[in-house]
Image (spheres, grey):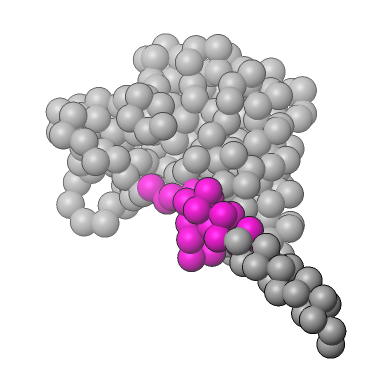
Amino acid sequence: MSRRILQSVHTRIFVGVLSILLVSVFSGNPASGESAAPVVFSVKTSDPVIFITIDDGFVMNAEARDLILSERIPITLFLKGNIWKQPRYREFFSPLVTAGATVGNHTEIHSDLAKGSASHATKDICTGRDSAEAASGQIVNWLRPPGGSYNHATQIAAASCGQTRLVLWDVTVNGEKIATYGGPIKAGDIILFHWRKDLHISLKKVLSEAKRLGLTPASLADYLQ
Ligand SMILES: [Zn+2]
């Protein structure tokens, strides 16, 4: 190898290393060179508030929707993107958005994001965000991974789609059964509901339990960026 070629190789290696270093510095994650959306299960607050989040959207429960509207319950909606795309669903859910519901991203087709390729996960997250934004007119920043299934690659894919957080939960409700990680519901809990036939029953149960404990539903958007 001539001196000239060798010099050129050295220059290319130097430029390569320099660009890797620069990418690491500007991405804020020197280890992987890519940023990852952080995960939240509950909100750290001493305010007596809880957060109601409702997923999927297959079942249009009018009694639940009317209860949310009449009681002015602040909610975050994590509907699937392909639900938002169907006019009859959009018509059903739009009054909640008009009344102030925050809209999140629950992917387009409800993929298990911890399985399959990173490119598939990225596509499902970005498309779900686009559908939610188009239907709601809101900037959609939060991803709720379907089934709560995620890994580090999911967090990177979410960040690449402009999602600032993965919003999980620490309380679930099934009919009248409230499941916590121990004890009653408490300040800062993020509560998972689904659009199901018994959603209104679950909501009433949680509202009465919250009242008993001196807790009030609040908007997650007031507590999370
Ligand atoms: Zn779901």
Magenta span has 167?
Answer: no
Magenta span has 36?
Answer: yes
Q: 225 and 66: which one is in front? A: 225
**Numbered marks: total:** 0
Query: Measuring 35% from the left and 24% from the top, which residue is drawn there?
Result: 222
Q: Specify the quadrant of the image occupied by residue 133.
A: top right
Visible in this render: residue 170? yes
Q: 155 and 221: which one is in front? A: 155
Q: Where is residue 130 shown, x and y percent of the image?
A: 70, 33
Query: Measuring 49% from the left and 36% from the top, which residue is drawn there?
Result: 54
Question: In what quadrant of the picture does the N terminus appear?
Answer: bottom right
Q: Where is residue 23 shown, x and y percent of the image?
A: 58, 54
Q: Where is residue 199 shown, x and y percent of the image?
A: 47, 35
Q: 146 and 152: which one is in front? A: 152
Visible in this render: residue 147? no
Left or right, 100 with respect to 14, comes to: left
Query: Measuring 53% from the left and 18% from the top, which residue is drawn there?
Result: 96
Residue lying farthest to the bottom in this orientation: 1
Query: Measuring 37% from the left and 15% from the top, which residue is drawn there?
Result: 71
Q: Specify the quadrant of the image occupied by residue 34.
A: bottom right
Q: Where is residue 149 shown, x and y percent of the image?
A: 53, 59
Left or right, 47 with respect to 20, comes to: left
The residue segment tinted magenta is: 19-40
